[in-house]
Image (tube, rainbow, N blue to C red):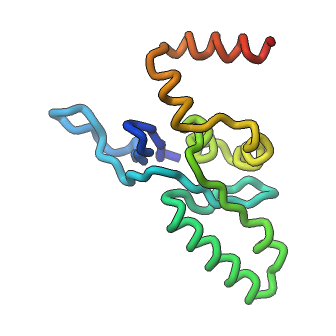
Amino acid sequence: MHLMYQLRSGHYYLYDMRDAPNAITGERPYRLKTELVAIAFDRITGRVHQHGPPTRINSWAMGAQRRLRMAGDWEAADRLVVVSGPLPEEEINKCLRVQGYCRWMLMRLASMPHGKLNAHRNAGRSSWQRRESSQQRRAA
């Protein structure tokens, strides 16, 4: 998938990486800007159905569940899960990139760090420093 979220200034920006960067600024145009991100997915398969602002995704999920139940597919309606909040941008992007990753994220949701606080804490550190500190935490 060519979509990618990036957390900047407390907002999540959705970019389509197929879009060419601006010749003057070098930045790609963003498709969406939101304070929180929601992901609707199948609890069993981990397949992503929708992602975006929580109000739109929750509304879509309630309508989808209602249509599935009216069609008699109660099991599929119960498998539809919506996760929203300030999620770490790496986790959101893995959900979009890796098929089935959302079900693994759902199992770790309670122990997952706050997405926006984690971004501020790591902002002044390089990627190798973040990787090294995460390896040290795992070893401890």
Residue at 29 percent of width and 46 percent of height: 29
Q: Position of residue 95 (x, y in %)?
A: 63, 45
* 93 with respect to 71 (left or right): left
* 26 with respect to 64 (left or right): left
Relative depth, front residue between 19 and 34? 34
Q: Position of residue 51 (x, y in %)?
A: 55, 57
Query: Which of the 4 image quarters holds residue 17?
Result: top left
Query: Which of the 4 image quarters holds residue 64?
Result: bottom right
Q: Position of residue 70 (x, y in %)?
A: 74, 89
Residue at 57 percent of width and 61 percent of height: 50
Q: Position of residue 107 (x, y in %)?
A: 80, 45
Q: Residue furthest right?
A: 75
Residue at 57 percent of width and 56 percent of height: 38
As drawn, 50 above or below 87: below
Relative depth, front residue between 45 and 125? 125
Query: Which of the 4 image quarters holds residue 65?
Result: bottom right
As drawn, 54 above or below 90: below
**Quadrant the C terminus occupies:** top right
As drawn, 19 above or below 58: above
* 88 with respect to 32 (left or right): right
As drawn, 29 above or below 52: above
Q: Residue furthest left?
A: 24
Relative depth, front residue between 3 and 37? 37
* 96 with respect to 28 (left or right): right
Residue at 24 percent of width and 32 percent of height: 26
